[in-house]
Image (cartoon, rainbow, N blue to C red):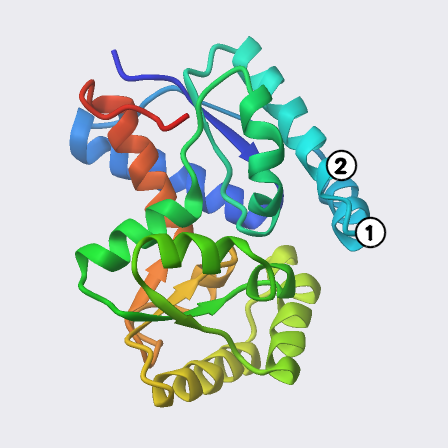
Amino acid sequence: MPKHIGIVACSAEGAALCYRTICLEGTKVLGPHAHPEVSLHTHPLSQYMQFVDADDWNGVADLMLSSAEKLASAGADFLICPDNTIHRAFDLMVARSPRPWLHIVEEVAKEARSQSYRRIAVLGTRYTMEGPVYPKKLAEAGLEYRVPGPEQRERINQIIFDELVYGEFRPEALEYFKFVIRNLKDEACDAVVLGCTEIPLLVTPESSPLPTLDSTRLLARAALRSAVDENVAAAD
């Protein structure tokens, strides 16, 4: 039997994309209409943002742990979180978690290495672009990275929180993302991480000036592999 996947969600659009990817791509592995058992829990995004805006990552970790405990009670065998921003709290809660986890940035780094990319552009919320998680994980994988300049980071962050998390995907926003990606391509980046789980709903591989690393779908596919392959263990 496939393992039971628990999704610790944060924002609705990214979590929904992750869930849909597991279910739809599960049929390719398990047959028509089949996919692993999946449970999802989320506290309101507003609760997360109170802690994020206060730079209180212990508070974020406690919310993640609360979801983890609920999902463990529901029978989840391992956990994933389709949200890059709150992975800044990952190390603060994982040792206390009742179930093992996959790490979204580790899955991105694995895919980047498998594609022989060397310098990665990172897009996401300002907490992701300015935070320590991607630099650390990409460095561990032997990868360089670049982020946009301060004004571009602020504008991207605004688009994410004012539009994308509400399911608004405007042509003007896509053009801005394409402009930023072209600039990063000029800095010799050979791929771009769509490091906010809503960005893949706006920027597609066909529209991007660089090859994309879709963190949402990469995590979902890693979870699917872990659920159906007894030889693939979720990482502690």
Cα distance between the residues tagged 1 and 2:
9 Å
Viewer can see residue 41: no
Q: Is residue 17 left or right of residue 221?
A: right
Placement of 145 over or under 48, stated as above or below: below
- On residue 59, the disc is 2
Where does the C terminus fall, quadrant-wise?
A: top left
Residue located 62% across and 34% down the image: 92
| x 37%, y 43%: residue | 219
Q: Do labels 1 and 2 touch, CB within 8 Å? A: yes
Circle 2 sits in a helix, a strand or a loop, which is it? helix
Q: Amino acid at mark 2?
A: Gly
- Mark 1 vs mark 2: which is more N-terminal? 1
Q: Nearer the viewer, residue 9 or 119?
A: 119
Mark 2 closeness class: few <14, some 14–19, many ≥20 residues within 10 Å: some
Q: Quadrant of residue 229?
A: top left
Say which residue label 1 marks: 54
Q: Position of residue 97 (x, y in %)?
A: 56, 20
Q: Amino acid at mark 1?
A: Ala
| Residue 186 image position (x, y, % from top left) | 36, 90
Q: Secondary structure at mark 1?
A: loop
Q: How many marks?
A: 2
